[in-house]
Image (cartoon, rainbow, N blue to C red):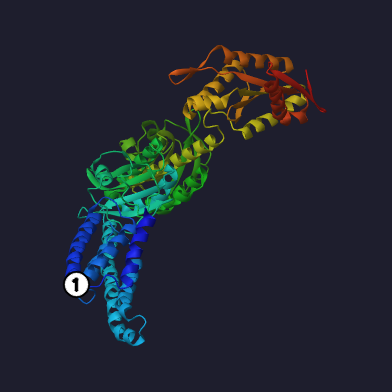
Amino acid sequence: METALYAVSHLTFAVLAAGYPVSGTLPGTAVGAVLLAATLLFAWHLHVRDSTPRPGLVLCVVAAASLSVRLLGGAFTPAVAVYPLLFIWMRMPTIEGPLYHAGIIVSVTELLGHLSPGWGTPFALLNLLPGGLAAFAAPFLSMFGADLLLERHSRPGVHQNAARKESQPGFFPEDVARSMLPLLHRATGANGVFLVVRDGAGALRLSDFLASSGSVPESFLPSPSDPFMSAALMSVGLVTMEATVDRRLPWYIEDPGTASVVMMPLSRNGIVGGFYACDFHSRPAPSEAGEVLLDAAGVLSAAWGETAGPTGGMLTDICIELGSAGGLKAAVHSMVVNLARHIHSSTVTVAVLTEDGRELQAYETLGSMSSGRRGRLFPADKGVAGWAVSNRRVVHRRAVGRGDSSIRPFISDDDPQQPVGSCCAVPLFSERAVFGALVVESAGENGVTPEHAKQLEAAGAVFGVFSARMAALERVESLSDRDRLTGLPCYAAFQEELLGLVNDVRKGLSVAVLAVDICGFRALNAEHGPRICDSLLGDAAKRIADTLGGTFGMTRFSPGKFLVCMPGADRAAAQAYAVRIMEAFSVTPFAAGEREAAMSVAVGGAVSRVDRMIPRLPFFAEDALGAVLNKGAGPAVLSVDQFGKTRC
C-alpha cells in the first residue's frame, strides 16, 4: 500500500513537471477549486485523527495540493498561498510528514512545469527562466519558513517550560520518569516503552521513548480523544488494550506490528501527570509487565512533590545506573555508592534475609559506621531494619523509637560506642516478596530526615523494578534450557546429565538409555491439528515419567521422540521398563480435545558399563529403535561394550 501511494504521488509530480494540465481555463479553475477544498478537508481529517499518517499518504496530499494550484492559475496567482499552509500542516506533530522531500520535489516541479513550453527552443527557454526561478522560490521559501516558524514557536518552549517545572517542587518529576525508561525497557521485554506527560495547560506530549522496531516522531502531541490516550488518562490503574488494523498505536509512524499495549497512569493525590506505555508483539501482553509498571508508578509517586527537596538528582542517577547494571551485585554496589554520595556523612547498608528468614546478613555497606559490618548476621525482627522487613514498610527511627533514643539500625548492642543519630530502613522487594532491607544512618540527629525517607522509598522501588528484570531474565534462561511443549530439559542438558554418570559407571554401575517413538505422529498431527498434538506431547511425556517412577532423566529430541536415561539400570531392568512404557500407551487412550486419540509407541534402548560408551548411548538406542520399527517386534535393548554393541 505504501509503495502504491508513493507511485501515485510521484506520477502526479511527473505530469505537473511536464506542463500538464494547462492553467488558466475556466473548467480547470472550477475543478481546481473543488480539488483544493477536498484536499484541505482531507488534510484536516488527517490532522485530528488518532494516528500519524504514513509518508506516502502525506505525499499524495501534497501532490493533490500542487495539482489544485496549477489548475487555479499557478504560482503567480493567490493560489500560491496554499504552499505555506501545506508545509505548516506537514510540520504538525500529528502529521510529521517528509517536509524537505516534499518541498524540494514541489519546487522542482514548479520550475520544470513553468519551463516546459520552451523545451527545444533555447531562446524561449531563456525568456521563461526568470519566471521559472520565481515559481521555484515560492514553495522553496515556504518550506523553510514553515520549518523555522514552528521550530522556534513550539519545541524550545515546550522543553523550557518542562525544565522550569522540573526545577520546582510539587511538579511531576519528568527527569526521573525519563531516566527509568531503559530499566523498564529491559525489565518488561517490550518492543517499545513510552512516557507521555501533561503540561500545565493539560496538553499531552510524548516526552521520551525507547523502541526496538518501528518509526516514532521526534516531537509528538497525541490527541486526548485517541482511544489509547483516553483509556490511560481516565484509569486509576493498569490498562491493557489490543491494537487492531483500525486502532493503531498513535505514537508510531511506521507500525512494527505490535499487538497489545499495557499503560499505567502516573498520578498523585488524584492528579495525573502522565503515563507509561509498553507495547508487545504478543497478545495478550505478559502479566509481568503490569507488575513492573506498578512498581514504576510507585517510584514516580514517591518522587513527586516535596521529595524533590534534600537530594535532587539522586533518583535520576540511581535509575540510570541500575538501567545499565549487569547483575545483582553490580546493582547493589551502584545503589549504595549513589546513596552515600548524595546523603552526606551517612552510612548505607544493604542486608539480605537468610534462607530461613530469621536473620539479616549485611551484604554491602559503605560509610563511617560500616567498619566490621559486612557479612555480619543480625536478627530479622530487631532494630529499625527488622521493623521495616517485618511490616513491609519504610520506617524512620523516630517512628519506631517513640522517644527511645537507644533503638539502633539492627540490634540494641550494634556498635555501642557509636551515637545513634538518625536512621531510615526500606524493605527491598523482589516480585512482591521482601528479600532484604536498605538502611541509611547518620551520626547526626538530622542527617537522615523523614523527607529523605520518602526518597529512599522511591530508591527501593527502583531496585524492585531492577530485581523484577533479573527474575524475568532468570525465567528466560530457564526456559531456554527447557522444551516449550513438555517442560523437559533440552538435549544439551540431557547430554550433560549423561556425562555426569561416567563416575558411577567407573564404580561398577550400569547406565541405560531408552529411545521412545510415538508411532504415526505425523498422521496424528494431520488428524487433530498442531494445537491438540502439542498438548498430546505433554501428556505423553507425563505418562512416560509416571511409568518410570524413579530417578531418571528425559528429553524430547525430535517431534515425536523421547530419550530416557536410567542410572543404575542393567539390560534386564531396561527391557522391563520398555515393556511397561509400551503397555502404558496401549491400554488407555489420550484426550484430544473433545475426542480421544489412541497412541502406541516403539522402544529401543542401549545399556553399558563402559565409561567411554556412556555419551554414545543415545545413538545406540536410536539404532535399536530403528530395528524395532523395521521389524515391528517388541522392545529391544542393546548391550554395549568397548568394542561396539551386541544384542542380548
Q: What is the residue that sits farthest to the bottom in this orientation?
A: 123
Q: Report the side of 334 relative to 241 (left or right).
A: right
Decide which of 196, 356 is in the foreground and name it: 196
Specify whether residue 287 is in view.
yes
Decide which of 239, 121 is in the foreground and name it: 121
Q: Amino acid at mark 1?
A: Thr
Residue 402: percent from left, percent from top: 30, 36
Q: What is the residue that sits farthest to the right in this orientation?
A: 643
Q: Which residue is mark 1?
A: 25
> What residue is shown at x 37% (from left), y 44% (from top)?
279
- Compared with 634, 262 (above or below) is below
Q: State which quadrant residue 160 falls in.
A: bottom left
> What residue is shown at x 53% (from left), y 42% (from top)?
372
Residue 567: percent from left, percent from top: 68, 22
Quadrant where the C terminus sits is: top right
Specify whether residue 154 is in view.
no
